[in-house]
Image: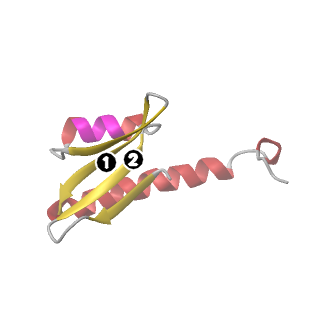
Amino acid sequence: MASELWRLDENNFAIYIDSEHDKEVRNIKRSRDWPIIATYQKGGQIIGLQWRLPESDYRKAKRIETRINKNVHESAKSLPTSDLNIG
């Protein structure tokens, strides 16, 4: 999972982003006033962050989610088949 957006309650949404997308994470921390509501760790390393955002910021978050997921799918398509673990 690279990024996911869902409704928390009637007034808020949540967005999760893998920490490998450090450019998007930095942009959110710098330019959005969204509180971090969860961090996901594995082996002492942060692997993902989750923010709460108001319903009014849904479209902004949806664009971020779409951009991240599009980039993930495009990079998977560009891998040579010898790099894929098939079989």
Name which quarter of the figure residue 24 lies in.
top left
Residue 36 versus residue 3: which sits nearer the camera?
36
Is 28 magenta? The answer is: yes
Q: Position of residue 67 (x, y in %)?
A: 43, 53
Residue at horizontal 22%, vertical 53%? 52
Distance CA(mark 1)–CA(mark 2)? 7 Å
> Is residue 80 positioned above or below 1 on the image?
above
In-image side of 33 versus 15 (left or right): left
Is 22 magenta? The answer is: no
Q: Nearer the viewer, mark 1 or mark 2?
A: 1
Name the residue beneath numbered marker 2: 17
Residue at far front of view? 43
Which scheme is used to colour this image of the protein? secondary structure
Q: Which residues are magenta?
A: 25-29
Residue at horizontal 32%, vertical 54%? 15
- The amino acid sitting under disc 2 is Ile
Q: Residues within 10 Å of mark 2 (few under 14, many from 20)?
A: many
Q: Position of residue 3 (x, y in %)?
A: 42, 53
Quarter in which the C terminus is drawn: bottom right
Residue at horizontal 67%, vertical 53%? 77
**Pointers 1 and 2 in contact (CB under 8 A)?**
yes
Residue at horizontal 81%, vertical 52%? 86
Residue 36 versus residue 71: which sits nearer the camera?
36
Q: Position of residue 55 (x, y in %)?
A: 17, 65
- The amino acid sitting under disc 1 is Gln
Q: Position of residue 34 (x, y in %)?
A: 18, 47
In-image side of 29 versus 71 (left or right): left
Which numbered disc covers residue 50? 1
In-image side of 25 versus 21 (left or right): left
Name which quarter of the figure residue 9 lies in.
bottom left
In-image side of 73 versus 24 (left or right): right
